Image (spheres, rainbow, N blue to C red):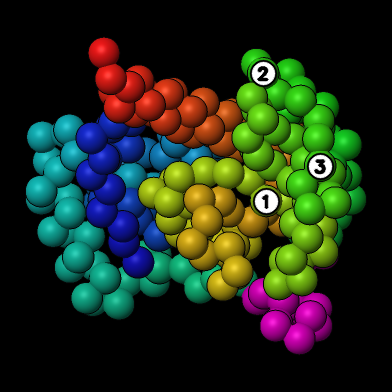
Amino acid sequence: MLILRDKPTNTADNGVWLATTQEHHQSLRREFPNMRSIQVLGKRVTGWQVLPVDVPDFELAALRACELVLAGDTRIGKIPGARRSKSGSKATGRSSKQIKTSKKHGINFDTVREIGLALPGVQGSTAYGSPALKVHGKLLACVPSHRSAEPGSLVVRVGFDDRAELLAADPNVYYVTDHYLNYSSVLVRLSRVTPDVLRDLLGMAHKFMTADAARRSTSRHRRTPA
């Protein structure tokens, strides 16, 4: 239904996130004039919308959103699409439109490699015998080798906060299994992303990994005796 985002960095999308779909944007905007798409998700128009914390009517808007939820307003709330079961059987519920979109974009690891290698310091590599991309020797993205991942997936390194936001915003694209739960990463169904979305996602991963490397370097220097 709702997510409260209050991060000390990347504050542009702080506020209340509304779980909704694009067909309801126009009517919801009459309730919430300052409602907008979520920038961090890398799309021009996002299904989920944010009530920004830095607008004058934020508190009133947040309370109004809660009232709509309690009243059962069908414009707020999303049910995740069907997923692959643990036995590996195919998920149901994919529309013909989704299938056509998948074929049209034709995203595979060759596309991932092409986009990733354009980022500073990224090199092609392998991880557990699967194709991978690494930045300064650290894993950035790879084809998952664990059997819990769905075929046609990609593992991408992101922070836990960013993963939670991605999972909430588009569970048909992003998911996580028990095996990957404690790792700072998210699984991506490549058949359901566009090259632009993939480019933004790899950019997010690159920023996360290079920032993490910088933090580790600073920490080592602090521990080094003078």
Tag count: 3
Report the side of 152 relative to 39 (left or right).
right
Q: What residue is rendered at 17% in x and 54% in y?
A: 62
The residue at 67%/30% (across/down) is 137
Disc 2 packing (10 Å; few <14; some 14–19; many ≥20): few
Q: Give the quarter of the image for residue 91.
A: bottom right
Answer above or below: position of 150 versus 40.
Answer: below
89 within the magenta span? yes
Residue in view at x 80 percent, y 83 percent:
89
- Tag 3 or tag 1, which sits nearer the N-term? 3
Amino acid type, callout 1: Val
Q: Is residue 180 above or below residue 112?
A: below
Q: Position of residue 117 (x, y in %)?
A: 76, 23
- The residue to which callout 1 is attached is 155
**Mark 2 and mark 1: span between their CA atoms?**
19 Å
Range of residues picked out in magenta: 82-97
Q: Is residue 219 magenta?
A: no
Determine the residue located farthest toward the front in the rendered image. Answer: 225
Q: Nearer the viewer, residue 37 or 23?
A: 37
Element at label 3: strand
Which disc, if any, is residue 121? Answer: 2
